[in-house]
Image (cartoon, grey):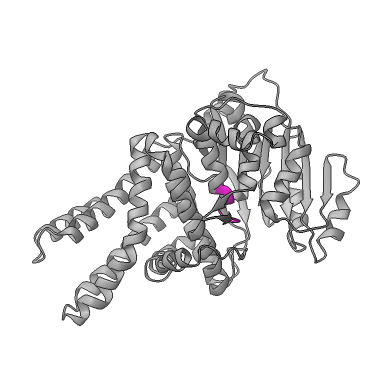
């Protein structure tokens, strides 16, 4: 990687193009990738490992946790999801399942768990969406810690236990993200590609942010929050609006932003929603919370198994990203300089990326430069192979690392353009689960 990095820099400086904006852009992107990989590999330490190995929570009472799950038309997966929560090694828990007016066989599946004393099932008569359903569940939740997962996920037995150990040890931690992979990764090439991508999103990008206590997205497959950190902001989250209307997406990013920004925007939010039950019932003090990532807390999620479904999901995620620019972007510059700098550079890269693709693969060939497109594709493939190498390090017995370059090509050549489609259709709130 270092050799390639040096060659790229020298090639840019000594090319006929000379030093230009695109030269600086290329070197900056390469440097960011190098920095991200380096920090993720050398600086990040799984916070649960030392706590468990050294028994640092000895004699501490384990808190009650509330596992809150919203479900809508998931008859194929919901039973496995609930069983994974039941079978968790963490015993001091309650499980609250909110059936958001499902129209399939979900209700009959949920009835199988009606006799389990640790499970409470709320059946809503009208569909109110994921955030609204979770808010209903939180109204009756008694736990000090809230555990969220998606209804098509399976949580590993020891994952919740590992995360709760972190909360018990560090009172400044407001939220923890688990490590997600594709549950259906062996189904076809699309699920294999996504599985290789998920690994890097968590073990590299979240690891970097976690090293500074500033993870920007506590992801839905396994998202765990301290009650004190989010309770007063549930109404603001549930009723989140953007450009004058309800914003149904960005559920994970928005809730994370409220925790990250508690010390900056918390009092303003509580004042705005002062008549909300979530504020009136108990007023928790705002605080500069840490948001971190636990690599050893594993969860598997069902990913889209067709290209069309994958694109629809990516559009929803792009809209969520645009929303986060105007929420997290307001205060994230106050966080440690490394993750803050990379956060804002990422915004720049995402909007400039498609224009770079257009120049390299369309403009330059039409201008007579037929070599540059091949070099550009080679560079993208190289980055994908580097991510693939990290995938192989994390999963030495798995061959799916070979699909990572395909995801890099797909992301650069096709998915990157979705940011503009998402921007122009930002008010279309039709939910595509994928």
Q: Is residue 398 visible?
A: no
Residue 77: image x %, image y %?
Answer: 73, 60
Is 332 placed above or below 192 here?
above
Q: Is residue 153 visible?
A: yes
Among the 4 quarters of the image, the one containing residue 129: bottom right
Q: Is residue 280 magenta?
A: no
Identify which residue is drawn at 63% across, 37% down. Answer: 273
Residue 332: image x %, image y %?
Answer: 41, 39
Identify which residue is drawn at 36% across, 52% down. Answer: 346
Residue 189: image x %, image y %?
Answer: 52, 71
Question: Residues in magenta?
Answer: 247-252
Q: Nearer the viewer, residue 74 or 375?
A: 74
Number of residue marks: 0
Left or right: 159 in relation to 139 = left
Is 309 placed above or below 58 here?
below
Q: Nearer the viewer, residue 142 or 10?
A: 142
Left or right: 5 in relation to 266 = left
Q: Main secondary structure of the magenta part?
A: loop
Among the 4 quarters of the image, the one containing residue 225: top right
Which quarter of the image is occupied by the C terminus? Answer: bottom right
Identify which residue is drawn at 23% across, 76% down. Answer: 363
The outermost residue toward the right is 115
Is 392 placed above or below 424 here?
above
The outermost residue toward the top is 59
Residue 62: image x %, image y %?
Answer: 70, 26
Identify which residue is drawn at 61% across, 56% down. Answer: 248
């Amino acid at each position: 990687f270092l050799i390639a990095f040096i060659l790229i820099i020298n090639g840019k400086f000594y090319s006929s193009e000379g030093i230009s904006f695109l030269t600086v852009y290329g070197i900056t992107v390469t440097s960011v990738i190098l920095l991200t990989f380096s920090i993720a590999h050398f600086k990040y330490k799984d916070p649960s490992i030392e706590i468990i190995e050294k028994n640092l929570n000895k004699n501490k009472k384990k808190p009650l946790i509330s596992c809150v799950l919203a479900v809508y038309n998931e008859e194929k997966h919901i039973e496995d999801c609930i069983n994974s929560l039941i079978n968790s090694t963490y015993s001091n828990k309650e499980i609250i399942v909110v059936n958001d007016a499902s129209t399939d066989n979900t209700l009959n599946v949920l009835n199988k768990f009606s006799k389990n004393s640790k499970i409470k099932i709320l059946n809503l008569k009208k569909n109110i969406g994921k955030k609204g359903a979770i808010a209903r569940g939180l109204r009756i939740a008694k736990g000090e810690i809230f555990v969220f997962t998606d209804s098509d996920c399976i949580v590993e037995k020891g994952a919740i236990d590992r995360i709760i150990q972190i909360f018990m040890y560090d009172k400044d931690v407001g939220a923890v993200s688990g490590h997600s992979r594709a549950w259906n990764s062996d189904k076809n090439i699309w699920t294999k590609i996504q599985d290789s991508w998920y690994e890097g999103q968590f073990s590299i990008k979240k690891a970097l942010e976690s090293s500074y206590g500033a993870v920007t997205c506590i992801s839905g497959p396994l998202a765990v929050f301290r009650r004190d950190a989010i309770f007063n902001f549930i109404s603001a989250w549930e009723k989140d609006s953007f450009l004058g209307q309800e914003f149904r997406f960005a559920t994970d990013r928005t809730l994370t932003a409220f925790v990250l920004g508690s010390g900056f925007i918390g009092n303003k939010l509580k004042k705005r929603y002062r008549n909300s039950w979530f504020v009136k019932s108990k007023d928790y003090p705002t605080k500069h919370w840490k948001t971190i990532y636990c690599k050893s807390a594993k969860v598997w999620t069902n990913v889209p198994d067709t290209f069309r479904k994958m694109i629809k999901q990516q559009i929803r995620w792009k809209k969520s990203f645009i929303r986060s620019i105007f929420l997290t972007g307001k205060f994230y510059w106050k966080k440690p300089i490394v993750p803050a700098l990379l956060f804002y550079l990422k915004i720049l890269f995402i909007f400039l990326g498609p224009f770079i693709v257009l120049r390299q693969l369309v403009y330059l060939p039409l201008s007579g430069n037929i070599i540059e497109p091949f070099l550009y594709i080679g560079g993208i493939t190289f980055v994908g192979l580097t991510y693939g190498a990290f995938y192989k390090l994390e999963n030495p017995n798995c061959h799916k690392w070979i699909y990572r370059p395909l995801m890099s090509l797909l992301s650069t050549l096709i998915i990157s353009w979705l940011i503009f489609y998402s921007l122009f259709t930002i008010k279309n709130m039709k939910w595509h689960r994928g």
